[in-house]
């Protein structure tokens, strides 16, 4: 009867067939328990071995042995099922020695990087000791006092403290520390396990974090890694004695909130090309005339964008008192004298220029 009715109305039949091919919406979980159950189901569907969840006795044994507490969201997942595929820590059957290595691997890797790289250091640790062994001991002391990172999968960890749901997930391998996701739900949405991406199978939960919580030490280390990686991007843009100084100006603007493309537009301009009749600005050392033109053009762009004189001077790293001489905002540009090196003016934060404003 139903078939007869649909055949009598071809448009209705076509619509019904089209509707039948619409994919079902991905399920959205509103509780940790529902999410954990859904996640374990999809891990099993992706051919990842999953054993029975950890019992309260097993949780207590692990936490007392390694002096940390599983954060509630990870605990909820491991209660539902214990993934034991390649890369996942086996909290039930791995030996204490194996689990000890897993939980201490981030500290060991970072200390190794400190021992061989004199540039690897965190600002909050204070001045780096000249002696490498002493530097490692200082770093290790801070790392031991930081929140313990609980392994989730391979080099991905979640902080054990604060003992609340929603802690971010970090990627830690040697000295490479990155913020990977805002929370554990974001990690499983981004990750690929056995060539399966779980985000294609089910949606992120309604409670998924949209901002990363700051974690003592680890957030700072992740920020340091982002900054170091980003600075590599400008390698070779400037050369010669003044290259490092222009690099510093560039990153003062970037860290002040300017987008990469905006700062590039301001600094990677064609003024020197016109003067030198060259297209390659990094082919040789920048002479004084070229740098002077660039700094003047940069200051003019910033002033034209609404920056005050004080803001422009501060962004270029100059902390002199010439602003008290009655210079006002307006159409101004920089004049400067180049000093020998960036170390000649330590009170001025390694600024290689002596600036003064001139009215135009």
Image: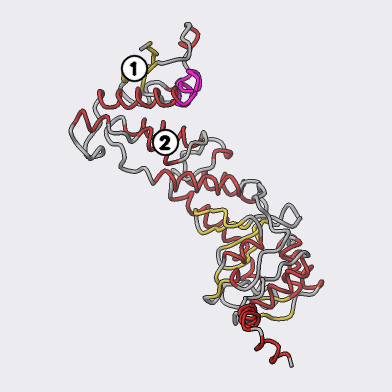
Q: CA distance from mark 1 to mark 2?
A: 21 Å
Percent position of residue 202, x then y: 65, 71
Which stretch appears magenta? 305-319
Determine the residue located farthest toward the right in the rendered image. Answer: 56
Determine the residue located farthest toward the front in the rendered image. Answer: 8
User: Label 1: how many residues lie within 10 Å, few (<14), some (14-19) or many (20+)?
Assistant: some
> In the depicted view, which residue is nearer to us: 34 or 136?
34
Percent position of residue 357, x then y: 39, 13
> Which disc number belongs to residue 336?
1
Q: Which residue is mark 2?
A: 263
| Residue at 69%, 92% in the rendered image | 4
Among numbered discs 1 and 2, the one appearing first in the sequence: 2
Percent position of residue 147, x then y: 67, 52
Name the quarter where the C terminus is drawn: top left
Q: Is residue 50 magenta?
A: no
> In the depicted view, which residue is nearer to us: 324 or 306?
306
Q: Can the viewer see residue 326 in this picture?
A: yes
Determine the residue located farthest toward the top in the rendered image. Answer: 325
Q: Is residue 17 above or below residue 131?
A: below
Percent position of residue 17, x then y: 62, 82
Q: Is residue 316 magenta?
A: yes
User: Label 2: how many residues lie within 10 Å, few (<14), some (14-19) or many (20+)?
Assistant: some
| Residue at 76%, 65% in the rendered image | 32
Determine the residue located farthest toward the left in the rendered image. Answer: 277
């Amino acid at each position: 009867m139903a078939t007869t009715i649909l055949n009598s109305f071809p448009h209705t039949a076509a619509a019904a067939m089209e509707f039948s091919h619409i994919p079902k919406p991905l399920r959205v979980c509103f509780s940790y328990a529902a999410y954990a159950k859904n996640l374990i189901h999809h891990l099993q569907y992706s051919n990842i071995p999953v054993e029975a969840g950890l019992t309260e006795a097993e949780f207590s044994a692990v936490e007392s042995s390694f002096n940390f507490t599983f954060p509630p969201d990870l605990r909820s997942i491991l209660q539902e099922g214990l993934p034991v595929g390649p890369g996942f820590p086996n909290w039930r059957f791995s030996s204490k020695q194996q689990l000890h290595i897993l939980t201490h691997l981030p500290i060991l890797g970072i200390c190794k990087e400190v021992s061989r790289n004199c540039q690897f250091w965190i600002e909050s640790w204070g001045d780096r000791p000249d002696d490498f062994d002493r530097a490692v001991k200082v770093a290790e002391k801070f790392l031991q006092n930081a929140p313990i990172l609980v392994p989730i999968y391979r080099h991905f960890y979640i902080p054990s403290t604060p003992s609340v749901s929603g802690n971010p997930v970090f990627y830690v391998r040697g000295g490479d520390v990155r913020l990977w996701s805002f929370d554990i739900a974001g990690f499983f949405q981004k990750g690929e396990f056995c060539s399966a991406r779980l985000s294609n199978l089910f949606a992120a939960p309604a409670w998924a974090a949209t901002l990363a919580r700051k974690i003592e030490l680890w957030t700072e280390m992740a920020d340091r890694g982002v900054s170091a990686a980003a600075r590599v991007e400008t390698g070779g843009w400037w050369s010669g004695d003044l290259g490092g100084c222009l690099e510093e100006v560039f990153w003062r603007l970037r860290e002040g909130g300017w987008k990469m493309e905006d700062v590039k537009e301001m600094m990677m301009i064609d003024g020197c090309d016109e003067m030198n009749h060259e297209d390659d600005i990094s082919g040789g050392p920048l002479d004084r005339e070229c740098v002077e033109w660039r700094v003047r053009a940069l200051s003019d762009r910033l002033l034209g964008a609404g920056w005050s004189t004080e803001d422009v001077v501060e962004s270029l790293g100059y902390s002199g008192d010439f602003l008290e001489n009655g210079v006002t905002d307006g159409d101004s540009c920089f004049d400067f004298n180049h000093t020998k090196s960036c170390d000649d003016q330590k009170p001025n934060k390694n600024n290689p220029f002596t600036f003064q404003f001139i009215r135009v």
